[in-house]
Image (cartoon, helix red, strand yellow):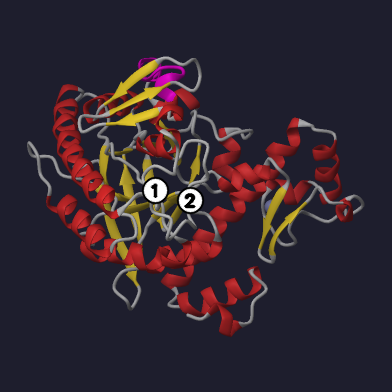
Amino acid sequence: MADFGFSVGTVLENGLGRTGVIHTPHGDIQTPAFVAVGTKATVKAVLPEAVAELGAQAVLANAYHLFLQPGSDIVDAAGGLGAFMNWPGPTFTDSGGFQVMSLGVGFKKVLAMDAAGLADDDVIAPGKSRLAHVDDDGVTFTSHLNGDRHRFTPEFSMRIQHELGADIMFAFDECTTLMNTRNYQESSLDRTQAWAVRCLREHARLTTERASKPYQALFGVVQGAQYEDLRRKAARDLAVLEVDGASFDGFGIGGALEKENLGTIVGWVCSELPADKPRHLLGISEPDDFFAAIEAGADTFDCVMPSRVARNAAIYTADGRYNVNTAANRRDFGPLEEGCDCYTCLNYSKAYLHHLFKAKEMLASTLATIHNERFTVRLVDSIRLSIEQGQFAEYRTAYLTRFYHRTESQVGS
Ligand SMILES: [Zn+2]
């Protein structure tokens, strides 16, 4: 499609990690890039002007949440997500597939990132307490807002996402956990593949039906948990899929990933995907994860963590994370992070933030979020620069040694 495209810039020696530019109807995204999360069409506590000023190039909202409230028809009538929330740049919507896990099998449980060896489809959340039930045709949700029941199918997710109008959408998939058995992962993957076909068909139909609107790109989502054969097969199958003349414009890498295997799994997937299409990794924000995923070929990222922990006074710096709420910061009139160029660090002190958090003032969340989002955006931007300059490996060693207070040999390469 003329309005959407991806061009590759500098490629790392391993042939996977790269810089690039994603072209969308609402502007370009220089990759690798961190996408700010605005689940309910707002980056919590921060004005869109400040989100742009801190360097975020795009915002990702959630189709499931916006469907429940205010309703995708209202966002459509407003002119789409960007117009509704006064964000003129590129936008993404997540399909709602993640809620299949977070409200279904993973409901009230941590996402079990460290549950290796505990595989059992039933330990996760007992059937009755789940808010989502999956079958081959779709998912039945119970609204966490008012208990209403809703039915999500691939076609329905596509309709909602077309109404929301984001530049980049994701196919409706089932996101499993590491605790599901291998058998379950296999049948889930078949289901996700069948749903991908239905998403493309409905996407092609809606693109024609809504031809007066800006083109919306659709990314297929690669699942397969920690299994190499499943991940590779899923990536290959989605890469060649074409339905009614439509194919995926890019790809998402989904599912729970164990931290120690993150780079390996992303590498399996990216080595199967076509190099000329962008790849989004859902839900990471730790510095070592960025380096691992970017080296393995991921282009864009989103995560709620930088803003979520900011609202609890946790501050990211190049020397690690600290809590500005602790007594040591009460009389510290220096910035949250020495050398940071964000609005908060240029104008306010640790002592002021400490006071705002203690006094439970709303501005505390705003100022801390601006810093943490800027920190994360700047980290990913600096990794992009290191690739362009042929300094990726050296930069990673130096950065992670400092951030995690490790010796260089512990960081490795
Ligand atoms: Zn700052």
Q: Give the residue at the far bottom of this rendering.
A: 409
Question: Does 361 appear above or below 402?
Answer: above
Q: Where does the magenta region start and end?
A: 66-78
In terms of secondary structure, where does tag 1 sit?
A: loop
Question: Does 313 appear above or below 203?
Answer: below
Q: Nearer the viewer, residue 382 or 224?
A: 224
Kind of residue at badge 1: Thr
x and y percentages locating residue 149 in the rendered image: 38, 17
Kind of residue at badge 2: Ala
In terms of secondary structure, where does tag 2 sit?
A: loop
Q: Quadrant of residue 258?
A: bottom left
x and y percentages locating residue 20 in the rendered image: 34, 59
Does the magenta portion include 186? no
Q: Quadrant of the N terminus?
A: top left
Q: Pointer 1: what residue?
A: 177
Question: Does 391 appear above or below 382?
Answer: below
Q: Nearer the viewer, residue 316 or 326?
A: 326
Q: Quadrant of residue 17?
A: bottom left
Report the residue at 41% width, 57% height from top.
257
Q: Earlier in the sequence, mark 1 or mark 2?
A: 2
Q: Are marks 1 and 2 in contact (CB under 8 Å)?
A: yes
x and y percentages locating residue 235 in the rendered image: 22, 56
Report the residue at 38% width, 49% height from top.
120
Q: Pointer 2: what residue?
A: 112
Report the residue at 17% width, 57% height from top.
236
Classify residue 241 as left or right of residue 148: left
Q: Nearer the viewer, residue 87 or 161?
A: 161
Report the residue at 43% width, 55% height from top.
118
Tell me the distance, in whole angstroms, between the alpha carbons under discs 1 and 2.
7 Å
Classify residue 27 as left or right of residue 219: right
